[in-house]
Image (cartoon, grey):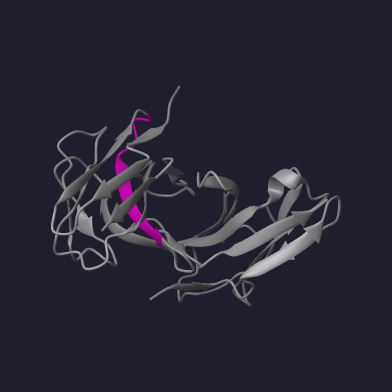
Amino acid sequence: DGGITQSPKYLFRKEGQNVTLSCEQNLNHDAMYWYRQDPGQGLRLIYYSQIVNDFQKGDIAEGYSVSREKKESFPLTVTSAQKNPTAFYLCASSIWASGGPYEQYFGPGTRLTVT
Amino acid sequence: AQTVTQSQPEMSVQEAETVTLSCTYDTSESDYYLFWYKQPPSRQMILVIRQEAYKQQNATENRFSVNFQKAAKSFSLKISDSQLGDAAMYFCAYRPPAGGSEKLVFGKGTKLTVNP
């Protein structure tokens, strides 16, 4: 089945530790995205990538880092510099082409709790 | 910057009835895309319906339809014959025209409760 996988579903870390969230897609999509979801805040874009080895900051990139070494994979690292890392993180992917309402497909998400 | 506003944090509807969720957006673009996503308790985001701004005809997907008013920058979602499985958070999203960043801008969501 084609889709997006995120692992793990729940992740617990101590304050001060970096943690990496996994996102893999087998949809052959060029573009991948990371969103953060907090209660009452909707989804906010952290980073996105249109092609391999290239990525751009979203609206709330501070304290996060990403890499895009393979088309299928777009891991997100939450660093100790992120002041409030506890949140629900969603990964998405889409076709990247001019024209057309190419919707984003979402993974099941990872709930990160930092104490 | 584009913004998306969902003015109803919560809505409720009786099973089999019809409910309309509101969404307004702000943009200076003339060509763009709009989406409604559903997030059930599992938290998996699911696309419900999409609308291209250049199309005057309102999009329809089975029991889901939109009322797209481009001049008013309004994009409401109508759910007919509501079912218990429709209970979820619903997010309205705006995407800029092609050639831009292609980023989705989301509203803060409306929580829909379906009463049996």
Q: Which residues are magenta?
A: A27-37
Report the quarter where the C terminus of chain A lies.
bottom left
Q: Which residue sits at x=85%, y=55%?
A: B17
Residue at the outermost right position: B16
Q: Residue furthest top?
A: A1
Q: Residue A85, located in which quarter of the rendered image?
A: bottom left
Quick check: B78 above or below A49?
Answer: below
Q: Quadrant of residue A84?
A: bottom left
- Determine whether, in the image, residue A78 is placed left or right of residue B41: left
Q: Position of residue A22 (x, y in %)?
A: 26, 39
Compared across the picture, whether B96 is left or right of A51 comes to right
Asked whether A74 falls inside the magenta stretch, the response is: no
Image check: B110 left or right of A33? right
**Residue drawn at point x = 38 percent, y = 30 percent:** A27
Q: Residue at x 86, y 50 (%)?
A: B16
| Side of B66 where B97 appears, left or right | left
Magenta segment's dominant SS is strand
Residue B106 visible here: yes
Give coordinates of residue A114: x percent, y percent.
26, 56
Can you give x and y, in whole percent of width and height, for residue B23 in the image?
61, 69
* Quadrant assignment for the N terminus of chain A: top left
Compared with A25, A20 (above or below) is below
Answer above or below: position of B80 versus A30.
Answer: below
How many badges with numbers are in the image? 0
Q: Position of residue B5 (x, y in %)?
A: 54, 74
In depth, the one of A50 and A64 nearer the eye is A64
User: Is residue B102 something one can see in this rendering?
Assistant: no
